[in-house]
Image: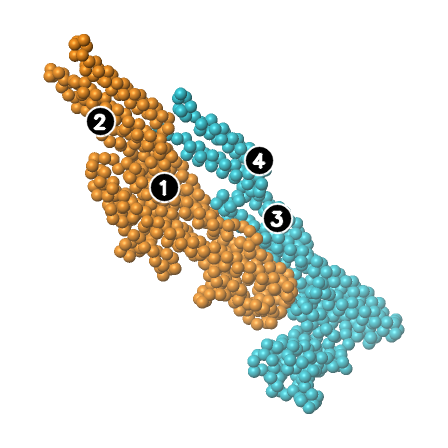
Chain colours: A orange, B cyan
Amino acid sequence: MSLNASLSIAVESLNAASGALQATNNNIANANTPGYTREVPVLVSEAPISIFGHGATVGDGVDLTKFQSVRDELLQTQIQQETSSQSGANAQLNALQQIEPTFTTSSQDIGTEMSAFFSSISTLSTNPSDAGSREAVLSAGQNLADAFNTASSALTSQQASLNTLVTRDVSQINQLTKQIAALTPQINALEAAGQDGGTLEDQQNQLILSLSKLTNVSITQSNDGVTISTGSGTALVVGNQSFNLQTTTGNDGMTHVLDQNGMDITSSITGGDLGGSIQTRDTAISGLLTQLNTLANQFASAMNAAQVSGYDQNGDAGTDFFKSSGASATISAGTIEVAIADPSQIAASSDGSSGGNGNLANFTAVQSKALPAGLTPGDAYANLVYQVGSLTSNANAESTATTTSLNQLNDQLSAVSGVSIDEESANLIQYQQAYEAAARVVSTIQDLLTVTMSMGTAAAE
Amino acid sequence: MRVTSLLPDIQYQMQQSQQAMATAEQQVSTGLRVNQLSDDPAASANMVVSLAESANIDQYTSNVNSVLPRMQATGSALSSIVSSLNSAITLGTSGANSDLQTDQKQAIAAEVQSDLSSVIAQANTEFNGVYVFGGSETTTPPFVAASTTYNSSQGSVGNPLTTSTALTAGSITAISDATTGQTMTFKAQAGDTIATLQQAVTNAVNAGTLSAGTTAAIDAQGQLSIETNNTADGIVVSSDDAALGTMSADPTTAVANAYAYVGNGTVNSVQVGDSLSVATNMPGSQLFTSGANVLGSLTSLINALQSGDTNQVGAATTAVSSALSYVSDQRVPFDGAINQLNSQESYLSDEKVNLTSQQNSLVGINLADAASNLSQAQLDNNAVLAAAAKVMPQTLLDYLK
C-alpha cells in the first residue's frame, strides 16, 4: 500500500469521525426536541484491497454511508393509540367535570329543592288555610322547576360546547392531514436516494401523534408513503394526498362529522379529543338528559294527577300544578314551570272544603311512590347523581390508566430513540479521539512522506 | 434498558404526590372524604337519599311542633268543657230537688246558662288563628248564635230582588241548621238565579239537611229572606254572593241558647312519620251536636230548670251526664294522638341523629385519619422531591475534565 493510499484512508477516517461528531452534535442539540429520534452514524468498512501484488489484502478504511434514525415502529404505533385513548378519556373527563357540580348537593340542586317542595306541602297540611304556607308551596314548586331548568341547561350547554369542540377538532384534523401529506414527497425522495427520512420523518410522526390526540387513526406504510384512516376506515391521508372531513348541523341540533363524500361518520368516530367529545355529547350527556327529562315529565305528571284529584280553596276542582313553558305541551326538564299563579288554586282539599287537607296526602305520596320509570322521584334523582359520578369517575380512572400506560410506553420509546446526554458525551469523546488518531495518522504519513521525499537528497549529500 | 432522561417520570411522580397532598389537605379542611360525586358515586347517591330522609325527618318534627300545641289547646278546651259539664251535672242534680223554690231554680238555670256559654266559648276556641273545632273551616267561629230569619242586604222596595235575579257564578251561600246540625252549601253556577237557590233549599229540606219549614223567598222589602219555622233552634246563613250582599240575622228572631254549627265534619290528618299520620282536629259537629249532643243537653237542662219541672230537670241532668261520657269517650283517641305525637317527637330526634351519623360515615372522614393521610402525603411528597433533587443534577459532564 502506498503512503498516498494510507493518507486516503486517514482522510476517510477524519471524515467519518467528523461526521459522527456532527451526528452527536445534532443529537445533543435536539435532546429536548419533542418527537426527535436520535441519529447514529452508519460506518462501514471499505472493501479490502490487495497490496504489494502478493495477494495480501488489507482494509481500505471506513465509509460513513448515512445517518440512521433509531426508531421502533411498533412502539410508535402503540403510543399513537394510547395517546388517542388518553385524549378521549381527558375529553370525557373535562366535559363531565363541568356538569358534575350541577348534580352535587347544594342549596339549589334538584334533590334539595325536591325535599323543600315536599316539606312545603307537608307544612301546608298543618294549616291548609294559611295563605303564607300556600304561597310557600308555589315558591318551592317554582324553585324545583328552576333546579330542573338549571340542570337541563347545564347539560345542553355542555353539548353546545362540545359541538364547538367537534368543529375545532375537525378543522385541526384537516390542517394536520394536509401537513402530513405535504411531507410525504420529501421523505419518499430521501428514501429513494437510500437515505433515512430522519428529521422529516420525525416531523411527520409528530404530526401523526398530534392527529392521534384528536381522533383514533389507523396507519399503514407503503412505497407511496403513509396511509392514514380513521378507526372506522375513512381515509384521511393516502401518500401525498389528504382528504378533508366536514361538519354540519344535524336534525338533532348537534354538529355531525362528514367524510369527503358527505357521508355521516359521526357515530363511528372513536378516541381522541373528537371521539371523546362526541361520545360524551351523544352517549353520556344525551343519556343523562333523557333520564332528567323523564324524571321531570313523570314527576310533573304525578303532581298534576294529585292536583286534579282534589279541590282548591274556592271549592273548584284542581287544575295542573306544572306545565311546559315551551312550544310543546310535553313537560321536560328544560320547560317545566309552575302552572298556577294563585296560591288558593292549590288543591289541598279532598272534599271541597276550603280548609281541608285530605288531598295533600296525594301530593306527598308522590315522594314515596314509584314513577312509571320504576323509581321514586328521589331515587331516580339519586340514580342520576350516581351516573354522573360514575361516568366522571370512570373517565378519571381511564385518564389515569392511559397516562400511566403512555408514560411507560414513552419511557420504552425513549430508551430506543431518545437522546442520552451522558451517552452522547461519551460518544463525543470517542469520536474526538478517533478524529485525533486519524489526524495523527495524517501527521505520521506526512512525516513519512517528508522522509521519503528527502531520501535522495540525503544520499546526494 | 437505556435511560435517556429521568425528567418525565420525575415530573409525573411529583404531580401525583402533589395531587395526593392536595386531596389529603382538602379532606382535612372540609372534614369530608367525598367532595365531588366522582370521589365516590355510590356514596354520593346514597347521600342524596339520606339527605331527603333527613329533610323529611325535619319536616315531620316541624309538623309535630306545629300541630302539637294546637292539639294541646284543643285538649285543654276539652278539659274545660268537661269541667263545665260536671258543673252543670252538679247544678242539675241540686235543681232536681223538689224542695227548691222557683227563684232558686231560676238561679240554678242562670248558672247552667253560664256553663253553656263557657262550653260555647271553648267550642269556639281559636289557636294561632285556627278555630280548632270547625273541622276544616278554621277561619271563622264554628258555633254561631242562631236566628229564625236572615235577610239579604241587597234588594229594596224600589229595586227588589226577584226569583230571576242572577247569582254570581262561584259564589257560595250556606245555611246551617241548628236542629239538624247540618249545613246546606250552595255554589252558584253560571246562569243560576235566586230561583235556583230556592230549589236548592227545597231539595235540602227534602233531604233532611235543613229542617222542614225552611224557605227562601223574596220578602216585602224586596230582599231575599231565608227563614225557618223552627223557633226552638233556628238557622245561620252566610253568603259571599255580591248579588245578595251580606246575609244578616233579623235581631228580633234570635233564638235563645241556640247555636248553629257553621263548620264542617272534615278531619285533617298530618303526616308525622313515613307511615304515620295523626288526626289533628275534632270537628265540633262530632263533639257537640251529634252523639249525646252536648249543647242540646245543656239547653234542655236550662229549659227544664226554668220550667221548674223536677222530673224534666232530672232527665235533662241524666242527658248532660250522657253528654259528659260521650265527650270523655271522644277525648280518649284524641289524647292518645297527643301522646303519640310526644313519642314521635322523641323518635324523630333519635332518627335525625342516626341519619346524621349515617351521612358522616357516607361522605365524612375521621379527623385523625385525615390528618394521618395528610402527614403520609407530605412524607411521600418530600421523598419524591428529595429523590428528584438527588438524581436530576447528575451527569457525566460533571466528571469530565
For residue B371, the mark is 4
Element under disc 3: helix
**Residue A235 image point, x, y percent:** 26, 49
**Residue B164 image point, x, y percent:** 60, 87
Q: Dot 1, how many residues are within 10 Å of its Cα: few (below 14), some (14-19), or many (20+)?
A: many
Camera-nearest residue between B281 and B87: B281
Closer to the eye: label 1 or 3: 1
Residue A225 horizontal side relative to residue B197, left or right: left
Instruction: Report the chain holding disc 1.
Output: A
Lower position in the chain sequence, tag 1 or tag 2: 2
Task: Residue under label 2, please give it.
Answer: A63
Do the residues at pointers 2 and 4 share their chain? no
- Residue drawn at x 60%, y 52% as measured from the top left: B57
Query: Gap in Å between the C-alphas at discs 1 and 3?
Result: 50 Å
Q: Amino acid at mark 2?
A: Asp
Closer to the eye: label 4 or 1: 1
Lower position in the chain sequence, tag 4 or tag 3: 3
Quadrant of res A52: top left
Task: Residue under label 1, please give it.
Answer: A83
Query: Gap in Å between the C-alphas at discs 1 and 2?
Result: 40 Å
Q: Amino acid at mark 3?
A: Lys
Do the residues at pointers 2 and 3 share their chain? no
For residue B352, the mark is 3
Query: Gap in Å between the C-alphas at discs 4 and 3?
Result: 28 Å
